[in-house]
Amino acid sequence: MTPTDLNDRDVMQQRVLIMGIGNLVLQDEGFGIHVIRELQNTQLPPYVDLLDGGTAGLHLMGYLQQYERVVVVDAALDSYPEGTLRCLKPSFGEFPPLVTAHEIGLKDVLEALTVTGFCPEVTLIVCSVKKYTSLGVDLSPAVRASVLPAARMALKVADCGS
């Protein structure tokens, strides 16, 4: 699903974008996309838009500039147990260790938006994963169990802002 196609920036600023990023063929690295798919089967508030951001990249700047608030859902290679969910507010220059397939893309997009003077308020929901060892579309059991809680967390953040 893509964001609502509205040209009036004032109207778009009232909306919240929930964007999942990841690569579906790299197992748990596709976590953010799985969360977006879960949310697509949910009754959403009318002010929430969903976006499958793929493996991120500078092409997302145009979408993100249309929103004052964005919730990004992604996988993170960190020291937390697999399946651990965290809600973070990344700041310029500080970023959690994301999975390598799109690590540079998301960080670069957010930093570029900051430099241009318009960066939405970003909340990052991450799920701790282990480094993938082979190709595959299935999530590990611990990460799969975190999809629905992450979807609920994203909606809560979209509703109240943190």
Image (cartoon, grey):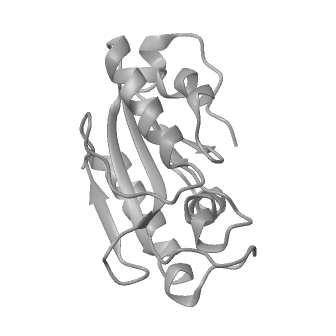
Q: Which residue is pictured at 44% across the width and 26% down the height?
A: 67
Q: Which residue is pictured at 61% across the width and 43% down the height?
A: 53
Horizontal arrangement in the rendering, residue 141 relative to residue 9 (left or right):
right
Quadrant placement of the N terminus: top right
Which residue is more in the foreground, 86 or 96?
A: 96
**Residue 147 x, y percent position in the rendering:** 52, 73
**Residue 21 x, y percent position in the rendering:** 57, 51
Q: Quadrant of residue 86?
A: bottom left
Q: Which residue is pictured at 63% across the width and 47% down the height?
A: 55
Q: Which residue is pictured at 59% across the width and 85% down the height?
A: 140
**Residue 150 x, y percent position in the rendering:** 44, 67
Which residue is more in the foreground, 21 or 57?
A: 57
**Residue 114 x, y percent position in the rendering:** 33, 22
Horizontal arrangement in the rendering, residue 66 relative to residue 28 (left or right):
left
State how many labels appear.
Answer: 0
Which residue sits furthest bottom? 141
Picture layout, residue 147 above or below residue 104: below
Which residue is more in the foreground, 16 or 120?
A: 120
